[in-house]
Amino acid sequence: MGEDLTAERIIATTGATGALGGRVAARLARLGLPQRLVVRDLNRAPELPKSSAVMAAYEDLPALGRAVRGADVLFLVAAADARDRGELHRRVVETAVSEGVRHIVYLSFLNAAADAACALGRDHHAVEALIRATGVAHTFLRPSLYLDLLPGWIGEDGTIRGPAGEGRVAWVSRDDVADVAAAVLRAPRAHVNRVYDVTGPEAVSLGRTATRLSTLTGRTIVYVPQTTEEAVGFLRSRGASEQEVETRVGACAAIAAGELDAVSTTVARLTGHPARSIEGYLRKNPSALSHAPLFGGSGKAVAAP
Ligand SMILES: NC(=O)c1ccc[n+]([C@@H]2O[C@H](COP(=O)([O-])OP(=O)(O)OC[C@H]3O[C@@H](n4cnc5c(N)ncnc54)[C@H](OP(=O)(O)O)[C@@H]3O)[C@@H](O)[C@H]2O)c1
C-alpha cells in the first residue's frame, strides 16, 4: 500500500509533542514524507527532516487555520483533557475542512459509540460523527488501551485495582498504533472512509493480565476487583486528578461491559508485522514493572520469552 508515497502531499500532524503523535511524526519523517507539526510549544517540537513546526492550540482557531492551510491530510489527536471537548473538536474539524484539508485520519478509541460505557468512547464517537457530517474523506483508527500505560495501572504493592470485573482487553502498544497510522498516512487514498480497530493479539482479563505479568517478571502482581465507588475513592486518596479518575474508571467500565473484548488483525494487515504481545512489550521494556514487589522477595525482574 505504498503507491501514494511519492506524492508530495503535506500531512499536518497534531499531537507531535505527545507519545503517540511523536511516534507517528518520526515514522512519517523516516518515510521521507513532508509534514507540518502542529504543536502548542515550539520548543518541544521534534526536529525531523522535511518537517516544519507551527504553534497552534486547538483553542486558537486562527492559528490552527494557518497551521493546517495547504495541508492535504490531517492526523488528528484529540485533546483529552480539554474542558468542552465536543465543542472544541467540532471547531477544529470545521476549521480544518474550511482550510482545504481533504482527508482526516482521526485517532479514536475502540468501540467508540453513543452509548459507550465510558466518556472516552462517547467523546470519540461524537468527533467521528462530526467528521463524517462534514463529508471529508476520513479514516478512523480505534486503538484499544495502550499497553505502554499498563505499568501505571500497577501499584507499588503489586495490585491492579479497578471496577473491570472479568471483562477482557487486548492491550496494544503505542508503537503498533503509530505503525498503523503511518501505513494509513503514507497512502491515505487506500483507506478512505475506513474504520480500523487496532488491538493487541489477545484479549485478557485484568486477573489474567496480573497472572501473566507475575509469571513473566517474578513479581507479585494481583488483580483486586473494585466497585466504581471504591475505585473513585481509592484513586482520589492516591492524589489522582479528576481527569485521571474519569479516564481510569471509564476504561474499567468499558472493560467490564465487554466493549474492549475485541482482537483485530489490523496491525498485521497494515504493517506486515504481528501486534506486540504483553511478553514482547516486557522483553523490550524489562524494567517496566520494577516498582512492583519481587515474588517472595527473591524473584528476578526478567521478562521471559
Ligand atoms: N487508548 C488508550 O489507552 C489511551 C490512553 C491514553 C490516551 N489516549 C488517547 O490517545 C491520544 C494520544 O495519546 P498520547 O499518549 O499520545 O497522549 P499525550 O502524550 O498526552 O499527547 C497528547 C498530545 O495532544 C496535544 N494536545 C492536547 N491538547 C491539545 C490542545 N488543546 N491543542 C493542541 N494540542 C493538544 C498535546 O500537546 P502538549 O504536548 O502541548 O500537551 C500532545 O502533543 C489522546 O487523544 C488520548 O485521549 C488513549
Image: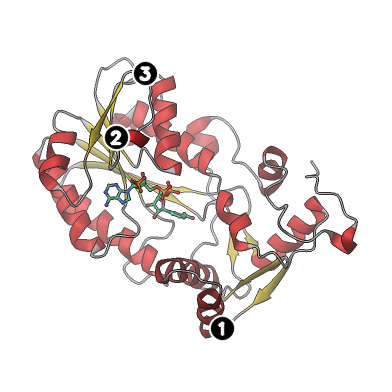
Q: Is residue 101 visible?
A: no
Q: Residue 228 at x, y = what percent? A: 52, 81
Spatial CA span between label 2 and label 3: 16 Å
> Dot 3 surroundings within 10 Å: few (below 14), some, or many (20 or more)?
some
Please determine whether, in this image, residue 237 is positioned above or below residue 66. Answer: below
Please determine whether, in this image, residue 290 is positioned above or below residue 231. Answer: above
* Closer to the camera in the image, 169 or 234: 234
> In the image, which disc is placed on residue 49?
3
The type of residue carrying mark 3 is: Pro
* Closer to the camera in the image, 118 or 159: 159
Q: Residue 241 at x, y = what percent? A: 44, 69
- Residue marked by disc 2: 42
Q: Quadrant of the N terminus?
A: top left
Q: How many marks?
A: 3
* Residue appearing at x 28%, y 60% in the figure: 82
Evaluate if marks 3 and 1 touch, with contact meaning CB atoms under 8 Å apart.
no
- Mark 2 vs mark 3, foreground winner is 2
* Residue appearing at x 72%, y 63% in the figure: 210
* Residue appearing at x 69%, y 60% in the figure: 209
- Residue marked by disc 1: 230
> Dot 2 surroundings within 10 Å: few (below 14), some, or many (20 or more)?
some
State left or right for residue 15 relative to residue 66.
right
